[in-house]
């Protein structure tokens, strides 16, 4: 196999591969191209994410098509990277073993070491941050000394505490937030790895050098920075939160390299339509309501609109009683009126736009809620009863037309979506590709904003069922060892370690967002990169 290889990742991204293994020399080439690209971006370049062996490049196909992006990257790669730049040195105080490192004894026994010897081995190396991904602020550090090499745990923990120092394979890392994980925990630190209000938001960045220092007592963690104050008075009170209601806008681009997912509305056209109806700019924040919507009491007079899935919105008015809200139309609500949802008729997600938009602090350029990293929106979480929402400057006379959307009743629960094969379709035999493109898959109940988990014909891998972790975008179809595809969605991770058989075309992701988990069915149809880019224009 000849490197570098330039592979499509859907219609608006590509992967420049420099190897197929974890190798400091390969990673240096990746970071060299990343540095050259940021110094000399081609038209339409949006952002890049360096990984162990490849550079994920996101771009605007309206400015540069796939062949043009390849030509620009090939020229930069041929020019060669400048001399390797030494990254910053980050010193991490860590307390090893005990409750902080419950797997230290097992790691030591596996290599016939004492716990003390294992700690010395871990803290005696200056690691390189090969990449940042998976979750905001998670740096993949290595190479780990051979005497500490360990496979991932057979059963991942449901919850790994924030600050846990862990090892897996020839890597070590620190969990920035509490989340599930399968690495072996050997210690803990109290330093903050990710701060959305910091500059930069990640303590450790790709190319940095990291050294662990053993301590008996951890320094107290820095207090969180206060969020910017809200400038607008409360305008909406949450009486009931619904199943999962979050503040979302068009997303948070530009921070992929920090492991920050784009978040944003799952059905972007529906949110844009709601904003247009009430006279907002496209990027204004609204509410994404999932399956069972919230009950919202208006504290001021304003316009609102409901688009997307039909969850039976009604407006309760003291003077006129209960009134069904017409879909796709601006509605005047007066102080005291209550917007609620009587039950799902079609679709999965409805969007509520309010004149002025939801006024929450901008974090990394967006008001969207990032549930995984726990920031944005209302304290990084779904709405709760008792929450008070502010809206921006209001213009009660402002409403406008919306882009055309399929009628709610026509939104089928069975859809066919277009995909661009790859970037790892060569990891699957021909019969697996035939099954993927020829059979229907059911949308599993566990599907969420992170990914659409599918159930159907098992897709056999050609060889190993894992790859060296590399970059992903929404729409990437990962196939884990069980052979059941997972389509990454708006809240999905920025990197992954399973082969990606294809990537769903950007224009078709909203159709997946409106499928009901447990009932929806999906078929895939392969198209060329050129066809996919035409669909996105």
Image (cartoon, helix red, strand yellow):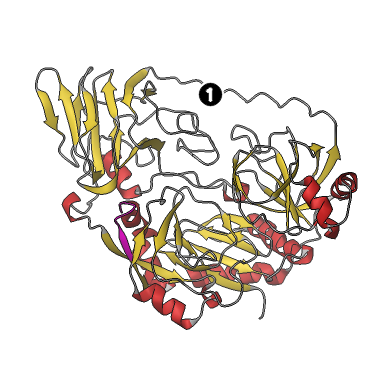
Secondary structure found at label 1: loop
Q: Is residue 162 left or right of residue 455?
A: right
* Residue 233 coordinates in the image, percent (x, y): 38, 17
Residue at (38% x, 67% y) in the render: 456
* Residue 537 coordinates in the image, percent (x, y): 36, 61
Residue 96 lies within the magenta run: no
User: What is the quadrant of residue 236 in the picture?
Assistant: top left
Residue lying at the far left of the rendered structure? 320
Q: Which quadrant is the N terminus positioned in?
A: bottom right
Residue at (51% x, 38% y) in the render: 365
Q: Is residue 185 left or right of residue 281?
A: right
* Residue 229 coordinates in the image, percent (x, y): 50, 20
Q: Is residue 399 visible?
A: yes
Q: Which of 412 and 369 is in front in this view?
A: 412
**Is residue 233 placed above or below 496 in the rendered structure?**
above
Magenta segment boundaries in residue numbering: 515-522
Residue at (23% x, 17% y) in the render: 335
Residue 516 lies within the magenta run: yes
How many numbered marks appear? Answer: 1
Residue at (68% x, 51% y) in the render: 183
* Residue 232 coordinates in the image, percent (x, y): 40, 19
**Is residue 455 placed above or below 85 in the rendered structure?**
below
User: What is the quadrant of residue 535 in the picture?
Assistant: bottom left
Q: Name the residue under label 1.
A: 228
Q: Which of 335 and 97 is in front in this view?
A: 97
């Amino acid at each position: 196999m000849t490197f570098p290889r330039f592979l499509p990742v859907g219609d608006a991204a590509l992967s420049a591969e420099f190897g197929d293994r974890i190798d400091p020399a390969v990673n240096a080439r990746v970071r060299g191209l990343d540095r050259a690209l940021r110094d000399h971006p081609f038209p339409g370049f949006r952002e890049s994410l360096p990984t162990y062996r490849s550079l994920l490049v996101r771009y605007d196909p309206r400015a540069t098509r796939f062949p043009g992006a390849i030509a620009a990257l090939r020229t930069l790669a041929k020019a060669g990277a400048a001399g390797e730049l030494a990254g910053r040195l980050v010193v991490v105080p860590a307390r090893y073993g005990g409750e902080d490192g419950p797997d230290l004894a097992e790691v030591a026994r596996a290599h016939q070491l004492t716990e003390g010897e294992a700690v010395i081995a871990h803290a005696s190396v200056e690691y390189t941050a090969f990449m940042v991904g998976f979750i905001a602020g998670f740096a993949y550090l290595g190479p780990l000394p051979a005497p500490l090499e360990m496979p991932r745990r057979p059963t991942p923990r449901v919850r790994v505490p924030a600050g846990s120092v862990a090892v897996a394979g020839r890597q070590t890392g620190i969990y920035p937030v509490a989340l599930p994980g399968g690495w072996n925990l050997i210690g803990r630190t109290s330093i903050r790895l990710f701060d959305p209000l910091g500059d930069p938001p990640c303590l450790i960045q790709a190319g940095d050098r990291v050294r662990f220092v053993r301590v008996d007592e951890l320094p107290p963690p820095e207090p969180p920075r206060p969020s910017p104050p809200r400038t607008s008075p409360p305008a909406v009170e949450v009486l009931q939160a619904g199943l999962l209601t979050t503040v979302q806008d068009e997303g948070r681009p530009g921070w992929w390299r920090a492991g920050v997912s784009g978040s944003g509305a799952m059905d972007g056209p529906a949110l844009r339509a709601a904003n247009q109806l009430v006279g907002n700019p496209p990027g204004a924040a609204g509410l994404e309501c999932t399956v069972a919507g919230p009950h919202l009491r208006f504290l001021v007079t304003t316009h609102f609109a409901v688009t997307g899935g039909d969850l039976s919105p009604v407006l309760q008015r003291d003077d006129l009683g209960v009134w069904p809200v017409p879909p796709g139309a601006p509605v005047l609500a007066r102080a005291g009126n209550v917007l609620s949802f009587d039950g799902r008729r079609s679709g999965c997600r409805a969007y509520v736009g309010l004149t002025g938009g939801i006024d929450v602090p901008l974090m990394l350029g967006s008001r969207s809620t990032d549930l995984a990293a726990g920031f944005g929106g209302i304290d990084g979480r779904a709405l709760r009863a008792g929450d008070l929402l502010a809206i921006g400057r209001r213009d009660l006379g402002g409403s406008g037309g919306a882009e055309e959307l399929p009628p709610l009743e026509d939104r089928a629960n069975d859809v066919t979506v277009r995909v661009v094969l790859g970037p790892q379709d060569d990891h699957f035999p021909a019969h697996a590709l035939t099954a993927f493109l020829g059979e229907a898959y059911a949308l599993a109940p566990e599907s969420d904003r992170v990914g659409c988990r599918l159930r159907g014909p098992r897709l056999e891998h050609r060889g190993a069922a894992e790859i060296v972790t590399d970059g992903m975008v929404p729409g990437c179809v990962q196939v884990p060892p069980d052979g059941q595809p997972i389509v990454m969605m708006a809240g999905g991770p920025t990197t992954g370690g399973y082969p990606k058989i294809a990537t769903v075309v950007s224009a078709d992701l909203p159709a997946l967002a409106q499928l009901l988990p447990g009932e929806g069915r999906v078929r895939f149809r392969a198209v060329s990169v050129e066809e996919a880019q035409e669909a996105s224009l």
